[in-house]
Image (cartoon, grey):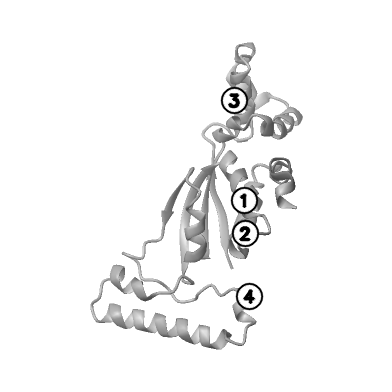
Amino acid sequence: MVKVKLISWSGGKVKDPRRLIVLAAKVSSGKLSEKDPDYYLEKYPDSKVRDWILQSVKFPSVQEHIVFTFLIEDISRVTSHQLIRHRIASYTQESQRYAKVSDGPVIPSSIESSPLSKRVRNFISEAYALYDELISSGIPYEDARYILPQAVKTRILMTLNLRELLHIACLRLRSEAQWEIRELTKRMIEEASKVIPEMPELVRRVCGETLQ
């Protein structure tokens, strides 16, 4: 099952990353001269911080100042290929050139429940076994990987801003999206909610009918 862990987020001296949106809004509106920046980062009322977070859907450029880094594990190469199409993000993926691929593929439930399930698992097991033989015979990892199925698991460290995360949510939480990337996106939103409690409401406001 896919694993997602929020590793870091916009921080430095800012304990609550949501306040970066407040500061950005004050900069944009020309009101920063009214208060010291630290006031908005430390003393601005929490109730008003929530208001600004929800209002940010009207001027989403301020959302780009909040940045998340996620460690994503146990997704298939099928899903990682979909994920990296979102280009306003940075990725570091587990290398198949330098690291040996571990056993334990991702198998869709549609295949698990199929009469062909056993044949599929046997096929993947044979591919892994041949992969191990190739490596043992001196074939480099980067060449042995050519015979592996896309079901193999991978890890990715992904960094992106709040605006892009919401954009991904609007695309990948839709019913048309594939099940694995929907599950991945759901868990990313859940992790981000640990520091931005308004995330579910932001998703609803930004995505609207696209998720219905």
Earlier in the chain: of badge 3 and badge 4, it is 3
Q: Residues within 10 Å of mark 1 (few under 14, many from 20)?
A: some
CB-based contact (under 8 Å), mark 1 and mark 4: no
Report the disc number at residue 109: 4
Front-most of residues 97 and 210: 210
Picture disc at residue 24: 3
Helix, strand or loop status at disc 1? helix
Indicate the secondary structure of the residue bearing disc 2. Answer: loop
Q: Which badge, 1 or 3, comes first in the chain's sequence? A: 3
Quarter assignment of residue 39: top right
Residue at position x 26%, y 71% in the image: 140
Asked if labels 3 and 1 touch by Cβ distance under 8 angstroms, the answer is no
Quarter holding the N terminus? bottom right
| Badge 2 density bin: few <14, some 14–19, many ≥20, Cα 10 Å | few
Name the element at disc 3. helix
Query: Residue at coordinates 59% horizontally, 30% vertically from top-left?
Result: 62
For marks 1 and 3, give the CA distance: 26 Å
| Foreground: disc 3 or disc 2 | 2
N-term mark: 1 or 4 = 4
Name the amino acid, label 2. Ala
- Residue 17's spot in the image, x, y percent? 60, 35
Q: Position of residue 115 (x, y in %)?
A: 61, 87
Q: Mark 1 — residue?
A: 171
| Residue picked out by circle 2 | 177
Mark 3 and mark 4: Cα distance apart in space: 45 Å
